[in-house]
């Protein structure tokens, strides 16, 4: 009887140990999964340096008609990648890994699809990887723009207005209106930005509307 009780006690110790171990693994996996939500969802191996040019008097005059901020620079995407010939069906589909990636600001990367390189007549699309706390600089575009977000929470600066909006949403950003946004959610936001133009181009301004914080 004593031996039997010892055996039962020994088995209980083993079961308890295994249960605790499995619980630890599950917690570890859950933590790992949660942490991954703050990282990039897509590859950023195609990262390129943006082309930055000093604005001329014409650009400065154009901006002066719409707002009071100074223009620091104009940014575009390098032209060092091939245009699609649009002969086969595969050339009508752009894999994100094939697109150039830019880093407009701390905690944000953008996969850029420029229309003139991909068979479009008048369309540019960007898909962002905006980490929690990430934000682009305050900037403008010559044409109108639309933002689409299916999941996440974003703080916007649109002109002189600050507001918070939670996905799903579509936002209309008029031409030449200074704007920026900041991911205030707890995981990466994949914002889709759409322009009725064929070239990715924006002007960075000397004003940042959000609190200056180091991105972690």
Image (cartoon, rainbow, N blue to C red):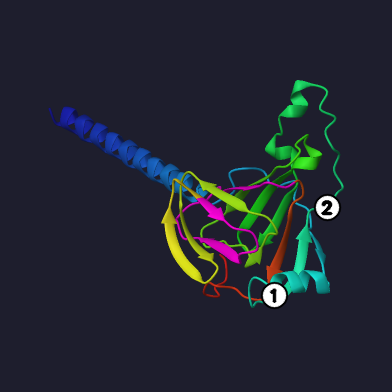
- Is-magenta flag for residue 198? no
Q: Quick check: can you spot residue 55?
A: no
Quadrant of the image for the C terminus?
Answer: bottom right
For numbered disc 2, what is the local secondary structure? loop
Give the left or right position of residue 30, taking residue 56 as reference: left
Describe residue 17's horizontal placement relative to residue 164 as left or right: left
**Is residue 185 within the magenta segment?**
yes
Please name the residue shown 48% across and 52% down the image.
187
Which label sits on residue 64? 1
Question: From the viewer's perspective, is 129 left or right of 202?
Answer: left
- List x then y, in percent, for residue 15: 28, 34
With respect to residue 132, does 199 lie above or below?
A: above
Q: Earlier in the sequence, mark 2 or mark 1?
A: 1
Image quadrant where residue 70 sits? bottom right
The residue segment tinted magenta is 171-197
Depth order, front residue of 183/213 = 183
């Amino acid at each position: 009887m004593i031996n039997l009780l010892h055996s039962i006690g020994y088995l209980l110790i083993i079961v308890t140990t295994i249960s605790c171990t499995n619980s630890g693994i599950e917690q570890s996996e859950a933590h790992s999964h949660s942490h991954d939500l703050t990282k990039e969802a897509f590859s950023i191996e195609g990262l390129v340096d943006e082309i930055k040019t000093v604005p001329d008097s014409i650009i400065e005059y154009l901006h002066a008609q719409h707002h009071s901020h100074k223009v620091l620079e104009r940014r575009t995407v390098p032209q060092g990648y091939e245009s699609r010939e649009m002969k086969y069906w595969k050339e009508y589909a752009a894999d994100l890994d094939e697109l150039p990636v830019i880093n407009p600001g701390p905690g944000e990367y953008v996969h850029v699809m420029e229309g003139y390189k991909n068979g479009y007549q008048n369309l540019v699309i960007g898909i962002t990887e905006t980490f929690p706390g990430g934000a682009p600089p305050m900037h403008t575009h010559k044409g109108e723009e639309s933002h689409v977000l299916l999941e996440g929470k974003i703080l916007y600066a649109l002109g002189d207005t600050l507001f918070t909006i939670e996905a799903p949403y579509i936002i209309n950003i008029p031409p030449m209106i200074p704007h920026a946004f900041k991911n205030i959610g707890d995981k990466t936001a994949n914002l889709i930005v759409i322009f009725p133009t064929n070239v990715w181009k924006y002007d960075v301004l000397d004003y940042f509307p959000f609190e200056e914080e180091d991105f972690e």
